[in-house]
Image (tube, rainbow, N blue to C red):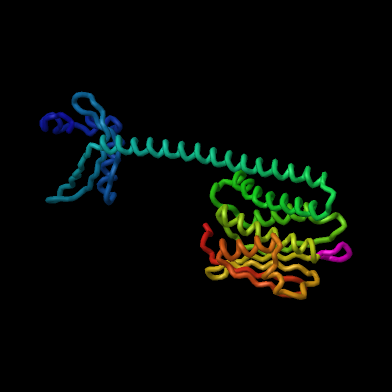
Amino acid sequence: MLGYEKEELIGKYLEIMDPNFTRETAKECMLDIKTTKNWRLETTQVKKSGEIFPVEVSGHGFIHGGQEYICAFGRDITQNIQYKNKIININYQLKKSLDEKEILLKEIHHRVKNNMEIISSLLAMQFRRAKDEEVKYILKQSRSRINTMALVHEFLYLGENLAYINVQDYIKKLVEDIKELYISNNTKLNVELHIDKLIFSTNRCIQIGMVLHELCVNSLKYAFKEDRENLLCIHMNKIGDKIHVKIRDNGEGIEDITHLYKSESIGMQLIHTIVEDQLDATIEFKNNSGLECNIKFPNKEEE
């Protein structure tokens, strides 16, 4: 492998083939080989022709006939190094491509968010021009629903993960935005959030966000008054293999609960469509010192 005849190496020092060593470090190396189990070293050696090549050396010491010996094996790892460098280069190219795609995806989410904000601004302009109160409320609801979806793209753009969102942060910001749009300064509202640490996909966050939006807006519209302390509680907990969601207000409740299961309002139809068809969930309404809604769906999409 080195290009020497046997006679040319007998009696020579290790440094003739491995210039990385000196007399002192060569002695230390011999001692390491004798005292270290499965001793290995990656180094470079020099052929008689002067060519330098990478080598993996393995060795061990033993005693035979009362004499100490060291047996070492050198293996040319040129191909291994070339293959390793090739893998490193491939990984670099893959990472570079991934980084470029992440930047592109972030830009896409940013543009989607901006486009939704433009639509929201157009609706706000129409809202200011409208005179009919029912039309104004419909425009406000549409704007709020668009903001709910735009918020998901904002979190994806600003976050480190382009596929999943922290549910705690998302719901907290969502409720703040809904309050700002629907609650007047004269209305006192306390919001209690009890959200487990959950990470959901983009689609799942939009689904949950739209349902919470409709239920929260319903409470803000019908349950809360300016002359008292208002309370909105939102729970989202992982129990077994299901996610339990509970939204409760401290309003007067509703006399005919069954009406909520067959309401033809856009909001309630949207809730039932998402809950039943997309979340594969169950939903239950009941009076509990106000209106309470309980939703349970399989925990299939948590990261």
> At which x and y percent is residue 7?
10, 31
In the picture as drawn, the residue positioned furthest to the right comes out as 227
> At which x and y percent is residue 85?
34, 35
Figure quadrant of the N terminus: top left
Compared with residue 64, is residue 86 higher up or lower down, i.e. above or below? above
Tell me the quarter of the picture where residue 268 sits.
Answer: bottom right
In the picture as drawn, the residue positioned furthest to the top comes out as 49
In the visual, does 131 lie left or right of 150? right
Compared with residue 24, is residue 124 higher up or lower down, i.e. above or below? below
Q: Main secondary structure of the magenta part?
A: loop
Instruction: Report the span colored magenta.
Output: 224-230
* 229 falls in the magenta region: yes
Compared with residue 111, is residue 136 higher up or lower down, i.e. above or below? below
* 260 falls in the magenta region: no
Identify which residue, 215 or 302, lies in the foreground: 215
In the visual, does 67 lie left or right of 208? left
